[in-house]
Image (cartoon, helix red, strand yellow):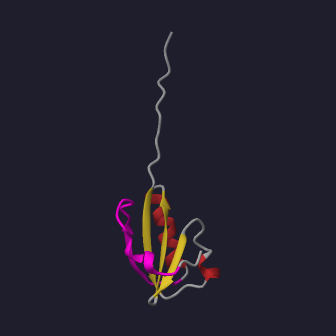
Amino acid sequence: MRRASVRSTLTVMTVYTIVVKGELSPRLGSAFEGMSMRVGGGETALVGDIIDQAQLQGVLSKVADLGLELLRVTPVDVDAPVALDALPDHT
């Protein structure tokens, strides 16, 4: 009798901060479902869990499709404080 091999696949998510130029309205920010939005200083930071590179590319494609100017994409060290926490939360 042959035993089937069972593999457990763990999904490790990474929290990313994606910053775009301009202060997005809550309506426009709703296009980024599942991400929190912080607005201030002429920028909008979208913060959320990204499962893999394909999902990250999807979010970045949405940024481009909406004609937004991408300023930076940064993986967040969840053990370190995030500088953008000082911005007001508009989720």
**Count of marks overlaid on the render:** 0
Question: At 47% across and 34% down in the image, what residue appears?
Answer: 8
Which quadrant does the C terminus fall into?
bottom right
Which residue occupies the foreground of this view, 84 or 12? 84
Q: Is residue 7 above or below residue 10?
A: above
Position of residue 44 measured from the top left corner of the image (x, y, whole percent): 48, 81
Q: In the image, is 64 to the left or to the right of 28?
A: left
Q: In the image, is 24 to the left or to the right of 16?
A: right
Position of residue 31 measured from the top left corner of the image (x, y, whole percent): 61, 74
Question: At 51% across and 66% down in the image, what residue appears?
Answer: 58
Image quadrant assignment for residue 90: bottom right
Which residue occupies the foreground of this view, 17 or 69? 17
Q: Is residue 40 above or below residue 14?
A: below
Question: At 52% across and 84% down in the image, what residue appears?
Answer: 67
Q: Which residues are magenta?
A: 67-88
Furthest toward the right, the residue is 27
63 is within the stretch colored magenta:
no
Q: Is residue 77 above or below residue 10?
A: below
Position of residue 10 measured from the top left corner of the image (x, y, whole percent): 46, 42
Question: At 49% across and 60% down in the image, what residue appears?
Answer: 49
72 is within the stretch colored magenta:
yes
Image quadrant assignment for residue 85: bottom left
Position of residue 11 measured from the top left corner of the image (x, y, whole percent): 47, 46
Furthest toward the top, the residue is 1
